[in-house]
Image (cartoon, rainbow, N blue to C red):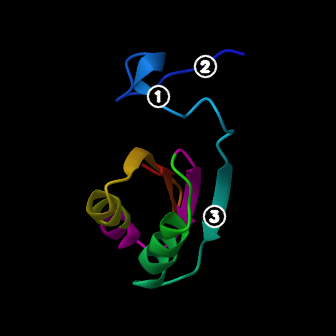
Amino acid sequence: MAVVLHPPYQDANALPGMLEAPMTDKTINLRGLKCPLPALRTRNLLTGAAPGDIFIVECTDPLSAIDIPHLVNQTGDHLEASTRDGDVLVFRIRKA
């Protein structure tokens, strides 16, 4: 089993407990929701998530470009990527 390490992890020793249980990767469709619902729903997802869980959050509300990164900063989780595909904003978030 190959392990791909992403920043901030430098080596497998920096992953306590991460190799013991499989992480889940979930795509969350929040398209069409207006502020503040994308941020509120993302917060609810992160609250119930296990450390290491990955969420791909898809939003169409332009304010999500501001709200989701601020939310992740407040919760202490990790925003691994943020992209735009046409009108869709896509955020890859890893639960800390």
How far apart marks 2 and 3 lie (CA) works out to 25 Å
Q: Amino acid at mark 3?
A: Ile
| Neighbour tally class for label 2: few under 14, some 14-19, many 20 plus, Cα within 10 Å | few
Q: Residue at x 52, y 77 (%)?
A: 41
Q: Is label 2 or label 1 in front?
A: 1
> Circles 2 and 1: CB distance less than 8 Å?
yes
Label 2 vs 1, first from the N-terminus:
2
Question: Toward which corner of the image does residue 88 lie, by quadrant?
Answer: bottom right
Look at the image and give the residue range highlighted in magenta: 52-67
Q: Residue at x 66, y 57 (%)?
A: 27
Q: Amino acid at mark 1?
A: Leu
Question: Toward which corner of the image does residue 62 lie, by quadrant?
Answer: bottom left
Q: Is residue 77 left or right of residue 31?
A: left
The numbered mark at residue 15 is: 1
Residue to which mark 2 is pinned: 3
Residue 66 is covered by the magenta coloring: yes
In the rendered view, tell whether residue 82 sits above or below residue 15.
Answer: below
| Neighbour tally class for label 1: few under 14, some 14-19, many 20 plus, Cα within 10 Å | few
**Local secondary structure at mark 1:** loop
Q: Position of residue 2 (x, y in %)?
A: 66, 15
How far apart marks 3 and 1 lie (CA) works out to 26 Å
